[in-house]
Image: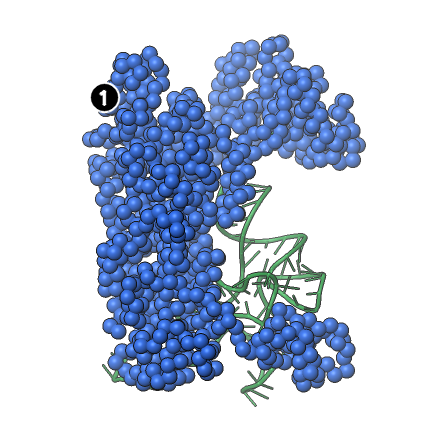
RNA sequence: GCGGAAGUGGCGGAAUUGGCAGACGCGCUAGCCUCAGGAGCUAGUGGCCGCAAGGCCAUCGGGGUUCGAGUCCCCGCUUCCGCACCA
């Protein structure tokens, strides 16, 4: 065999794979399919080892599944629209199209140099008109179904990025991308009605059994379902008016001593008119509205509020309570108004104590009334109702039912379900995104662009000013159109779509990426989808994954797909840290894969990143670990080199009934045990680090075996190879070694494909690993002839029995009690119990 | 505050169902090989006692269940992550 030059092998095999179109696939109903997908990349310019870890995880899965006989779809693409490219254009004057295409080209090269087995012919970029055309097509379908709608709304506005942010993109009151404090603005915005699917998105999480529990919990919390009731309080002096509140505890309504409005509640302005000084009320409400959200949360800003002077009528008691505006009531949740029950809600309690509002206890564990004056905090509302008129004495649960029913019968309320999930605002006042395909006509109102005029292409823009309005509004030939309906003058929508729209369905497009007539052929999607294995960062646990689940249902409801859930198994991969921090250009701690490739080759990098920790865990990058992996690969190479001549001439299978010595049988056992472990570790457990460990053990075993047969494997090329002829002299030995080495090389292939290909070829196999099958575990071979069973007396190991592997529990017990060492231990004692654990341990309890 | 995950050698981490804790690797030590070695091979490497055989102690702390606990239960501590005035 030639010397081991990993960099040369990288080049050689990457070229071969490319020439053979090795990873391109077609629909083939005769074969089981496996759709392996890593979250596609934002083309930021350079992939660092943190990004690359994800692609290697996916590649190990994909390459292994191919060897198991699956038809594997493993595509890659680019989430190419987005702010950074546009911001760079504003700063440096380079058009986003130019920088994005350049970045894609560079990063694609990086991934190819790593030997990731992508079907590159399916590559797509979301900034391709052939792709975003279908964003627009789907938008129009959603508009037709009422799932896309336009309304004026106050939106989250990032003053630094100059754009609107979805609720999901506001993190701790700041922009998810730049961290700037988010402001509020009123704009006409397009929304997707994701709330129509809230219940379904929630309940279906139970079927996602192969998703991490953490992600499911996050999604459930995000959707935030709560059961409760809406109740309309009357307004004293205004018989037609009402204040609707949402409560999860209608049974505590006799304890409501105030009604609280959110500062942005529409009734605030109206009630202000009734006050002595309307301007003061409006001003105070405005102060609350602009209070910094994050400070309110983290700094625990005091409960603040003021009395509107208006009094509300409790429909259950007929009594009146004051109506206040409170800074802690959220305008966007529920009805924007709540009833305050200070005795049973901590927030209401604090509010009541601050402003001297009455406190009334209405639920107690034993049904005995409690004096509210003694309370220092709100009491849990569990037990039986007290001081609640006709409902007194009922259990809390029963009261909730009866009160909701009464409210419905009398027409002042009903039981409802409330979600935290809000509709998804998708309008962005930016250039580098999908144009929203809508036209505004004075005559006909909002008119979708006809399908045959799609795509609405992004005009080439020369100037990027970074001013806050939509850049497309500055392009008259884009804005000014004729109405598709009446032919009159009309104006185009100049906002673009949130880039999360692009990423919510790209995995469907991969099934049929060049389709010019539809987003995809439903038959192709029916074959390939759902994605069997999806991996990416946890940072997408909510946004991307919930939007994708939503889009799957939209595609289902337009009749293009017949499933709900797009991703069967999800793996959230941990980040790679350097010096304890996430890699980033600004921190200067980026580990560039290309530098590592030049030094150690792709295989060592791939192997190390898989070996260092389980895929979900965060890891700290160390160069020393990488050197260890390079060393291991060199060790494997020497092993193959050492035995190659002796073993390539024997048949690749160990003959049945071959007379093997103890060492040979032990090696075979190790080989098959390793096959079992590696297969399960990759396929079932995705515990890729222990799969590598298992292979390392096998290599150690092979070295020890070599040591046992003759002189050992030389450490350096050119030294003696004395035992190779010795192996060759005994065909059985050669067959056993060949079996071990070939199993090893194939199992190594997903991790270190370049070296594995070369060794496989050197071992005399034509057609490369593409023609190779994953080694098959033989339980018969793996079973030991004899096993050593520890025998304990009262928890201490006192002897070890060497017995036949298939010894029965009764045999073990009998042999243990006859063992001299055990007999000695038992002298003068009575055996109370003997436990045989899985045939692997005997435990004697004596007194 | 609520929810989730986790705490194992000098380090990264194993231990699949409650069954010999520390696999595998890094690092370190010694020997061999070598003109040389930041290469390779072999051996050792949780702590304490012991020349040794062997023994004792050890999986964040404290209790418990069990013949047997890193693993299960209870209490506490610490760390990380998510959500956060959601009525």
Chain B colour? green
Residue at x 34%, y 29% (from the top left corner) = A137
Q: As drawn, which residue projects farthest toward the front? A: A30
Q: Indicate the position of residue A361 as horizontal and vertical percent values.
A: 72, 29
- Residue A715, can we see it? no
Q: Indicate the position of residue A142 as horizontal and vertical percent values.
A: 40, 27
Where, by quadrant of the figure, is residue A516 drawn?
top left
Chain A colour? blue
Residue at x 67%, y 34% (from the top left corner) = A378
Whether A13 is drawn above or below A255: the answer is below
Q: Is residue A599 left or right of residue A698?
A: left
- Per the image, the residue denoted by label 1 is A476
Residue at x 46%, y 43% (from the top left corner) = A541
Where, by quadrant of the figure, is residue A243 drawn?
top right
Q: As drawn, which residue projects farthest toward the left? A: A462
Whether A363 is drawn above or below A47: the answer is above
Q: Residues within 10 Å of mark 1 (few under 14, many from 20)?
A: few
Q: Is residue A545 left or right of residue A136?
A: right
Q: Nearer the viewer, residue B19 or A123?
A: A123
């Amino acid at each position: 065999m030639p010397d081991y030059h990993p960099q040369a092998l990288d080049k050689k095999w990457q070229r071969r794979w490319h020439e053979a179109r090795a990873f391109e696939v077609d629909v083939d109903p005769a074969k089981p399919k496996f759709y392996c997908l890593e979250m596609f990349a934002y083309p930021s310019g350079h992939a660092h080892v943190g990004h690359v870890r994800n692609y290697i995880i996916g590649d190990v899965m994909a390459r292994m599944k191919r060897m198991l006989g699956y038809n594997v779809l493993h595509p890659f693409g680019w989430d190419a629209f987005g702010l950074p490219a546009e911001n760079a254009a504003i700063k440096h004057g380079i058009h986003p199209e130019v920088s994005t295409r350049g970045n894609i080209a560079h990063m694609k090269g990086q991934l190819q140099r790593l030997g990731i087995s992508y079907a590159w012919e399916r590559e797509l970029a979301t900034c391709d008109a052939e792709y975003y055309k279908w964003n627009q097509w789907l938008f129009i379908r959603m508009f037709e179904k009422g799932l896309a709608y336009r309304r004026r709304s106050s939106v989250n506005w990032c003053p630094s990025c100059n754009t609107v942010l979805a609720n999901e993109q506001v993190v701790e009151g700041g922009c998810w991308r730049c961290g700037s404090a988010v402001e509020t603005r009123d704009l006409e915005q397009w929304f997707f009605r994701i709330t129509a699917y809230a219940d379904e998105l929630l309940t279906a999480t139970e079927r996602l059994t192969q998703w991490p529990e953490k992600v499911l919990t996050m999604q459930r919390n995000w959707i935030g379902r709560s059961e409760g009731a809406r109740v309309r309080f009357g307004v004293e002096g205004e018989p037609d008016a009402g204040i609707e509140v949402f409560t999860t505890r209608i049974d505590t309504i006799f304890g409501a001593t105030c009604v609280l409005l959110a500062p942005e509640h529409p009734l605030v302005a109206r009630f202000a008119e009734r006050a002595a000084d309307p301007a003061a009320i409006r001003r105070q409400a405005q102060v609350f509205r602009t209070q910094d959200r994050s400070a309110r949360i983290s700094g625990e800003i005091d409960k603040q509020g003021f009395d509107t002077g208006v009094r509300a009528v409790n429909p259950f008691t007929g009594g009146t309570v004051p109506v206040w505006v409170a800074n802690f009531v959220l305008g966007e949740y529920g009805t924007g108004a709540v009833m305050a029950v200070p005795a049973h809600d901590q927030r209401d309690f604090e509010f009541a104590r601050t402003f001297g509002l009455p406190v009334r206890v209405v639920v107690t564990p034993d049904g005995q009334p409690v004096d509210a004056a003694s309370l220092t905090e709100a009491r849990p509302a569990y037990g039986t109702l007290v001081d609640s008129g006709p409902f007194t004495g009922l259990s809390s649960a029963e009261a909730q039912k009866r009160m909701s029913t009464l409210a419905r019968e009398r027409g002042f309320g009903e039981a409802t379900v409330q979600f935290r999930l809000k509709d998804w605002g998708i309008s962005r006042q930016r250039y580098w995104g999908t144009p929203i395909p809508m036209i505004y006509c004075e005559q006909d109102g909002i008119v979708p662009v006809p399908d045959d005029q799609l795509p609405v292409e992004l005009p080439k823009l020369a100037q990027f000013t970074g001013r806050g309005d939509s850049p497309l509004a500055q392009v008259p030939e884009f804005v000014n159109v004729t109405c598709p309906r009446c032919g009159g003058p009309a104006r185009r929508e100049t906002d673009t779509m949130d880039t999360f729209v692009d990423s919510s369905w790209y995995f469907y497009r991969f099934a049929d990426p060049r389709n010019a007539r539809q987003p995809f052929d439903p038959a192709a999607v029916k074959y390939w989808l759902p994605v069997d294995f999806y991996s990416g960062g946890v940072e997408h646990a909510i946004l991307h994954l919930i939007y994708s689940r939503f889009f799957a249902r939209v595609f289902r409801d337009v009749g293009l797909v017949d499933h709900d859930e797009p991703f069967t198994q999800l793996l959230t991969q941990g980040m790679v840290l350097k010096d304890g921090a996430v890699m980033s250009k600004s921190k200067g701690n980026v580990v560039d894969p290309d530098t590592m490739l030049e030094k150690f080759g792709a295989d060592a990098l791939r192997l190390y990143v898989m070996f260092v920790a389980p895929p979900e865990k965060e890891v700290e990058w160390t160069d020393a670990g990488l050197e260890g992996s390079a060393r291991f690969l060199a060790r494997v190479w020497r092993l193959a080199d050492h035995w190659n001549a002796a073993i390539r001439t024997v048949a690749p299978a160990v003959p049945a009934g071959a007379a093997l010595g103890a060492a040979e049988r032990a090696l075979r056992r190790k080989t098959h045990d390793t096959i079992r472990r590696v297969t399960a570790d990759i396929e079932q457990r995705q515990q890729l680090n222990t799969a590598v460990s298992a292979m390392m053990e096998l290599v150690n075993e092979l070295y020890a075996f070599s040591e046992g047969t003759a002189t050992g494997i030389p450490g350096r090329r050119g030294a003696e190879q004395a035992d190779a002829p010795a192996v060759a002299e005994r065909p059985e030995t050669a067959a056993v070694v060949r079996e071990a080495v070939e199993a090893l090389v194939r199992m190594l292939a997903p991790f270190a494909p370049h070296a594995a290909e070369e060794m496989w070829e050197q071992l005399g196999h034509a057609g490369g690993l593409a023609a190779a099958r994953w080694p098959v575990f033989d339980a018969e071979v793996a079973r030991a002839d004899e096993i050593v069973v520890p025998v304990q007396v009262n928890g201490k190991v006192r002897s070890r029995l060497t017995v036949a592997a298939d010894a029965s529990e009764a045999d073990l017990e009998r042999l243990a009690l006859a063992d001299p060492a055990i007999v000695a231990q038992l002298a003068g004692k009575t055996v109370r119990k003997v436990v045989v654990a899985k045939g692997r341990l005997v435990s004697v309890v004596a007194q």
